[in-house]
Amino acid sequence: MEETTAEYSREDLIVEEPLRVVPRVSIACKTDLGRVRENNEDKFEFFIPESDALLASKGMVFVLCDGMGGHAAGQIASELTCKTFIDVYLHHSSPDPSRAAREAARAANRFVLDVARQVPGRHGMGTTLSALILCQDKGILTQVGDSRIYRLREERLEQLTCDHTFVEEQVRAGTLTPKQAESHPYAHVLTRAIGADDSVEPDVEIFDLMQNDVFLLCSDGLTNHVQDDEIAQALTLPPSEAAWKLVGSALIGGGQDNCTVLVVRVDSLERREG
């Protein structure tokens, strides 16, 4: 039998997953050029659906990217990646959000590569990608590069993502100590980035959500200047205060790069009956 390809609407692609849990969240975002850069290559986006169907099947999406490439190319790469990731994720036909997130990262990589090849002056542009999805009672992270996602849970701060850098891989292999890595000349050399290669393999992880979890998505303009203990202390504040304090601390600490933070606090996990 000859195969046929049907066209589907956005509604057709949404699997009717029952809405069992609604995360109620408070969010805050802040970005700053820093004290040295002339343009901001960081970008953040988020999407919070209002329909029960989309909330059940895809959840809430928060994305942060830190572009590279110079001459505004990095800014283009980060913006394209944010928008492409969210769009492809929401429209993906898989009922598995983790698979949809993985494919969305790959789609963003292809798009950035295509634009870099077609537009003069954009060759070599790329970006990091850190995405957090809150779907029912689960969190899903997607990671490429060295921007980070942290979680503060019961006063304990944990870095949920792994940096895709040369020195971090050496630390994990045991050939460098964390202390040596801090001052290593290759400390910021990425081993994975959106737009760097024809294909990319993002880290994708799933974990349980808890009420009062606080998540932080941030570019390395924060973590280059602000230590974990100060990050943990700031995340005990309301999200807007936390965002302002963290960016302010990065500026006081040197402000050598763009700094962007996105804070998401899980205020409750509302259970739906039936």
Image (cartoon, rainbow, N blue to C red):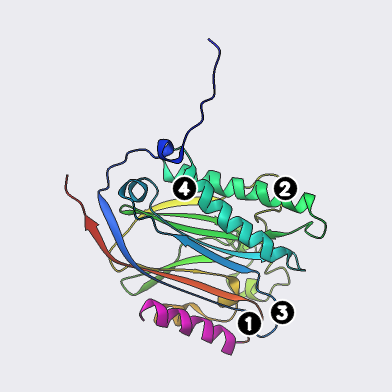
Give the SS element for disc 2: helix
Closer to the N terminus: mark 3 or mark 4? 3
Q: CA distance from mark 4 to mark 1?
A: 33 Å
- Please name the residue shown 79% across and 56% down the image: 123
Name, please, the residue furthest toward the top. 1
Q: Quadrant of residue 95?
A: top left
Q: Which residue is mark 1?
A: 34
What's the CA distance linking mark 3 and mark 2?
A: 26 Å
Residue at horizontal 46 percent and vertical 47 percent from the top? 90
Q: Which SS type dominates the magenta stretch?
A: helix
First to last magenta residue range = 234-253
Look at mark 3 in the image and give the residue it sits on: 38
Q: Residues within 10 Å of mark 2 (few under 14, many from 20)?
A: some
Residues at marks 3 and 2 touching, judged by CB atoms closer than 8 Å: no
Q: Earlier in the sequence, mark 3 or mark 2?
A: 3
Determine if residue 95 is in view. Answer: no
Q: Is residue 28 visible?
A: yes
Secondary structure under the numbered disc 3 in the rendered image: loop
| Three-letter residue code for mark 3 | Glu
Sequence-first disc among 1 and 2: 1
The numbered dot on residue 90 is 4
Give the structural element (helix, strand or loop) at label 4: helix
Q: In the image as oriented, which residue stretches furthest toward the left?
A: 273
**Quick one: label 4, few (<14), some, or many (20+) residues within 10 Å?**
many
Mark positioned earlier in the residue sequence (2 or 4): 4
Amino acid type for the residue under numbered disc 1: Gly
User: In this figure, which residue is indicated by the disc labeled 2?
Assistant: 114
Residue 94 sits inside the magenta stretch: no
Left or right of residue 197: residue 84: left
